[in-house]
């Protein structure tokens, strides 16, 4: 689904449903579908409630909210990153709707490694050859590459009964900021990165790279890679 005003184009084999997010247009788009995978972000997170209500009326069986990342329901993570509270509210809303016939699966993947490196999420500024570390960059965290995220979501749907009304945790591997930096320097042949300050992802970095905030899945949660038949990766 895409906003009616959106100019984004998609491959010819992708069917795009334009919507103004009114209930009739949402129901029209969702009728005949078994599942909704939400990728809404930012200020649009609360719009998921409208989609959930329309999905129930349209007979959708499974809703996967826009979660991903670290555990957005972790109390410490919610204290650090305010918009995690909106994601937690969507989780609670889905639980409240179980009696109306819809099921849900929340998927936590850790930060997207391939996208995050380019976007500066991990604290590395390639242009200025600087790095910003949290707690000296030694805290392990879970991360996932985008192809594995896609496979995980598809596998949630093919393992529908095992993932019904559950929070699922998957990752490609664990790493640290320091380990990422060492491999980046080796693979790119760059000069040593100096210590930098600031960045647009400061809040997320604080939650991702501090211990006990829901970012190290193997330490804090049950990891569901085996359940979803996801092959292991390595950095």
Image (tube, rainbow, N blue to C red):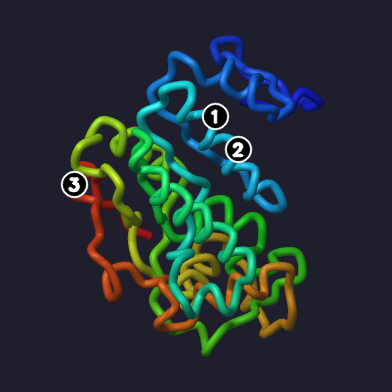
Nearer-N-terminus badge (3/1): 1
Q: Nearer the viewer, residue 235 or 207?
A: 207
The answer to whether residue 208 is above or below residue 224 is below
Report if the CB atoms under discs 1 and 2 are less than 8 Å apart: yes
Spatial CA distance of label 1 from label 2 is 6 Å
**Quadrant of the image occupied by residue 12:** top right
**Number of other residues with Cα within 10 Å of mark 2, as a class: few under 14, some 14 to 19, many 20 or more:** few
Q: Give the percent coordinates (x, y) of residue 216.
A: 36, 72
**Number of other residues with Cα within 10 Å of mark 1, as a class: few under 14, some 14 to 19, many 20 or more:** many
Residue 129: which numbered mark, if any?
none
Specify the quadrant that holds the C terminus.
bottom left
The answer to whether residue 71 is above or below residue 182 is above
Q: Nearer the viewer, residue 204 or 195?
A: 204
Residue 152 visible, this angle: no
The answer to whether residue 211 is above or below residue 144 is below
Comparing labels 2 and 3, the label whose residue is closer to the camera: 2
Comparing labels 3 and 1, the label whose residue is closer to the camera: 1
| Residue ID for mark 2 | 50
| Residue ID for mark 3 | 227
Q: Give the percent coordinates (x, y) of residue 200.
A: 73, 68
| Residue ID for mark 1 | 54
Spatial CA distance of label 3 from label 1 is 30 Å
Given the current orientation, which residue lies at the most extreme bottom position?
Answer: 135
Report if the CB atoms under discs 3 and 1 are less than 8 Å apart: no
Residue 223 visible, this angle: yes
Specify the quadrant that holds the N terminus.
top right
Indicate the secondary structure of the residue bearing disc 2. helix
The residue under the point 29% across, 51% down is 166
């Amino acid at each position: 689904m895409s906003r009616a005003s959106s100019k984004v184009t998609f491959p010819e084999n992708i069917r795009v449903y334009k919507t103004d997010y009114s209930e009739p247009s949402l129901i029209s788009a969702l009728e005949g579908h078994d599942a909704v995978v939400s990728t809404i972000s930012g200020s649009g997170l609360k719009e998921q409630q409208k989609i959930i209500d329309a999905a129930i009326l349209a007979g959708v069986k499974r809703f996967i909210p826009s979660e991903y990342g670290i555990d957005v329901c972790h109390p410490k993570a919610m204290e650090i990153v305010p918009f995690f509270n909106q994601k937690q509210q969507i989780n609670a809303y889905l639980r409240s709707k179980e009696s109306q016939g819809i099921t849900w699966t929340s998927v936590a993947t850790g930060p997207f490694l391939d996208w995050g490196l380019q976007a500066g999420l991990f604290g590395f500024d390639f242009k200025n050859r600087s790095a910003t570390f949290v707690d000296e960059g030694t805290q392990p965290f879970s991360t996932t590459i985008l192809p594995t995220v896609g496979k995980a979501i598809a596998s949630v749907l093919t393992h529908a009964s095992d993932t019904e009304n559950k929070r699922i945790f998957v990752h490609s591997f664990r790493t640290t900021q320091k380990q990422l930096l060492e491999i980046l320097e080796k693979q790119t042949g760059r000069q040593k990165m100096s210590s930098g300050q600031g960045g647009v992802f400061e809040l997320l970095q604080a939650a991702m790279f501090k211990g006990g905030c829901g970012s190290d899945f193997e330490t804090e949660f049950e990891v569901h890679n085996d359940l979803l038949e996801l092959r292991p990766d390595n950095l």
